[in-house]
Image (cartoon, grey):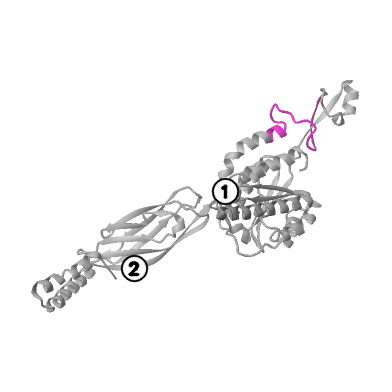
């Protein structure tokens, strides 16, 4: 049961006769009349439990986009159902107008559409529907809550795909598919052509030169069908929010852009999301299927508030491939103490693989180093300088152990990682 504002106003209206006559008995009589009216109103209200409920939902939407969820209500009872219905979406689903008025005659059906604009990635679930049915006087309502589950999967937005066309153009230059010919780089033979001044003499093909009596050089291109293994740290440090975005979401954006670029280059991409257990894994996918499987694997993963088990990472890489590969580790390198486990396993990885460590940096820290107007800002600037010094120390240690480091703000890290991949391609290190 639920009372309306009309019922409360009607009860307080009984105070007027008491003020006018000074007889408290009027209040008792009035309350009795109101209760009788409420009882009759409830008896004439349609039963909310006899509503047939169905729901249609979009299968998946990208973070930041909108989609419609439709709720169907069928009146299977013997009286009209007039009142309101509330669809129980969580706040993170961004539901608009999830509380609606209804007026459904007997045997008829109504469709209520709710616009969903989620602001968090993952699975957004609606657990129940609450219906209030008022009688003709709208004094007291019959209320019922029914379980009607529904799930919408919110995928990573992949906003970094806007950087893909420019990186693909550079990739085509490296691969000899445009008029720009990259000479003397890569390890895979491409073609023969005449020698011109400035060519590396080490690329001269002496056998072809002897046959043609003119100097002929080999052209090379970066090898294809290389392995790219992306390890995303889903431990506690990945839960920190930078620029209103969790670290792990920035890592996902970087991984998606790198995977799209590497798959176009003919390389095989594998993804593992790990903390102390494998949270998601994508292997053996190519072409459009790769990105579809990656966003599907990333969507339900949230950071775990536990330490990353770095000692298991070399074994994970071995389980993916036994050949030389590019291993990209998306993690945090803010503090030397937290990065000790990573530094311990890097020598084992860099002996066989090309290793790149990707870490997001906080632009607010850099901004804090420039503000020194009062004592508070000076202390904040000192703390920011110390944080940047820690990042520099960890980065230097990573490079000494044979790995590369890529850092950047959330908006800058994905293209920076793609540029690092292209640079390794151009240098023939993949």
- Residue 14 part of the magenta-drawn span: no
Snapshot quadrant of residue 331: bottom right
- Which residues are drawn in magenta? 171-194
Residue 289 drawn above or below residue 34: above
Q: Quadrant of the N terminus?
A: bottom left
Using a 10 Å C-alpha cutoff, classify the residue at mark 1 as few (fewer than 14 neighbours), some (14 to 19) or many (20 or more): few
Q: Is residue 177 left or right of residue 219?
A: left
| Residue located at (74% from left, 62% from top) | 311
Instruction: Please provide percent x and percent y for residue 188.
Output: 79, 37
Q: Which mark is residue 144?
A: 2
Mark 1 or mark 2: whose residue is earlier in sequence: 2
**177 vs 257, nearest the viewer:** 257
Using a 10 Å C-alpha cutoff, classify the residue at mark 2 as few (fewer than 14 neighbours), some (14 to 19) or many (20 or more): some
**375 vs 37, nearest the viewer:** 375
Q: Is residue 294 left or right of residue 99?
A: right
| Residue located at (71% from left, 28% from top) | 180
Q: What residue sits right under mark 1 in the picture? A: 371
Dot 1 lies on which element? Answer: loop
The reply to whether residue 266 is in sight is no
Q: Which mark is residue 171?
A: none
The reply to whether residue 153 is in sight is yes
């Amino acid at each position: 049961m639920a009372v309306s504002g009309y019922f409360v106003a009607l009860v307080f209206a009984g105070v007027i006769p008491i003020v006018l006559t000074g007889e408290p008995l009027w209040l008792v009589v009035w309350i009795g009349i109101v209760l009788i009216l409420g009882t009759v109103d409830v008896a004439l209200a349609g039963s909310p439990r006899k509503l047939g409920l169905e729901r249609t939902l979009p299968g998946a939407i990208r973070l930041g986009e909108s989609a419609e969820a439709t709720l169907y209500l069928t009146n299977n009872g013997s009286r009209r159902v007039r009142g309101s219905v509330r669809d129980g979406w969580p706040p993170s689903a961004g539901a608009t107008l999830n509380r609606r008025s209804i007026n459904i005659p007997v045997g008829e059906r109504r469709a209520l559409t709710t616009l969903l604009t989620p602001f968090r990635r993952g699975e957004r679930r609606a657990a129940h529907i609450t219906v209030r049915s008022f009688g003709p006087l709208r004094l007291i309502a019959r209320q019922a809550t029914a379980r009607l589950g529904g799930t919408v999967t919110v995928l990573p937005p992949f906003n970094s795909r806007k950087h893909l066309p420019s990186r693909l153009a550079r990739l085509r230059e490296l691969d000899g598919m445009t008029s720009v010919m990259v000479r003397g780089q890569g390890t895979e033979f491409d073609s023969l052509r005449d020698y011109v001044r400035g060519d590396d003499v080490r690329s001269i093909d002496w056998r072809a030169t002897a046959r043609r009596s003119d100097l002929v050089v080999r052209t090379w291109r970066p090898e294809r069908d290389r392995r790219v293994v992306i390890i995303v740290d889903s431990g506690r440090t990945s839960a920190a929010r930078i620029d209103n975005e969790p670290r792990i979401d920035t890592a996902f954006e970087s991984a998606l852009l790198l995977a799209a670029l590497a798959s176009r280059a003919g390389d095989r991409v594998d993804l593992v999301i790990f903390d102390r257990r494998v949270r998601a894994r994508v292997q053996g996918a190519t072409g459009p299927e790769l990105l579809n499987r990656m966003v599907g694997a990333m969507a339900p993963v949230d950071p775990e508030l536990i330490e990353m088990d770095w000692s298991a990472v070399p074994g994970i890489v071995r389980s993916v491939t036994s050949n030389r590969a590019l291993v990209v580790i998306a993690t945090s390198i803010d503090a030397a103490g937290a990065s000790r486990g990573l530094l311990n396993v890097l020598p084992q990885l860099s002996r066989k693989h090309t290793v790149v460590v990707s870490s997001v940096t906080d632009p607010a820290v850099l901004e804090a180093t420039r503000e020194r107007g009062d004592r508070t800002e000076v202390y904040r600037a000192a703390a920011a300088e110390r944080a940047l010094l820690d990042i520099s120390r960890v980065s230097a240690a990573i490079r000494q152990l044979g790995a590369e480091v890529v850092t950047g703000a959330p908006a800058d890290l994905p293209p920076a990682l793609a540029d690092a991949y292209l640079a390794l391609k151009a240098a023939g290190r993949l």
